[in-house]
Amino acid sequence: MATTYELRIYGRVQYAEFIDKVESLGRLLDVDGIIYIYRDSVRILANFPNEKKKQLFKEIIKDLEDDEGLIKVEWIEERDLNTYIEFPKGLNKISTNELKEINKKLDKIINYLERILNALEKQIKVSDEIRDILRDTFEV
């Protein structure tokens, strides 16, 4: 008989983008269940088609970190609930508040601001180099 598992994902994982990626991954692997934020973790209650897909699901989650450092999976706890809970088809988000869309937008704003700051830092370096070249060129 199939059983339902609880996965607790710890780290910097409470971003809307991470939740969306895990939800999409679950649907791709035919995982039925729910995903939600709880205190310091993201929790998933799910039924997996087989052990291989459960392990694959966990391995891919570990690789969902982003280049900007907003998402970092530190560890995943797994617990067999020794029961079967029937869920609607797919892995579905449940939200504890109505701020989900705002969180998505804030995640994107942070990403854009970091890109802008990186571009400004590069521009400052180029400006400094140009100033030094001009200073050396016109120095009498």
Image: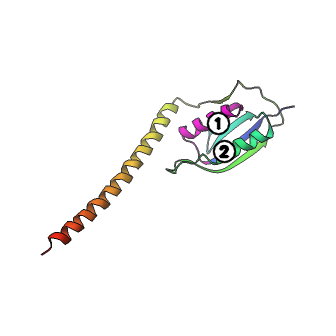
Residue at 37%, 48% in the rendered image: 116
Q: Was residue 50 drawn as part of the magenta stretch in this picture?
A: no
Span shown in magenta: 11-36
Instruction: Specify the farthest residue to the front.
Output: 137
Q: How is the image coloured?
A: rainbow
Q: Are marks 2 and 1 in contact (CB under 8 Å)?
A: yes
- Would residue 135 appear left or right of 108 to someone viewing this image? left
- Would residue 135 appear left or right of 124 to someone viewing this image? left
The residue where tag 2 is placed is: 60
Rendered location of residue 62, percent (x, y)? 65, 48
Q: Provide the secondary structure element on which disc 2 rests.
A: helix
Label 2 environment density (alpha carbons within 10 Å; few <14, some 14–19, many ≥20):
few
The answer to whether 35 is drawn above or below residue 72 in the figure is: above
Rendered location of residue 95, percent (x, y)? 59, 31
Q: Quadrant of residue 121?
A: bottom left
Residue at 77%, 38% in the rendered image: 5
How many numbered tags mark residues here?
A: 2
Q: Quadrant of residue 30?
A: top right
Q: Nearer the viewer, residue 133 or 31?
A: 133
Label 1 environment density (alpha carbons within 10 Å; few <14, some 14–19, many ≥20):
some
The residue where tag 1 is placed is: 25
Whole-number angstrom distance, CA of label 2 to CA of label 1? 8 Å
The answer to whether 91 is drawn above or below residue 7 in the figure is: above
Specify the amino acid type for callout 1. Leu
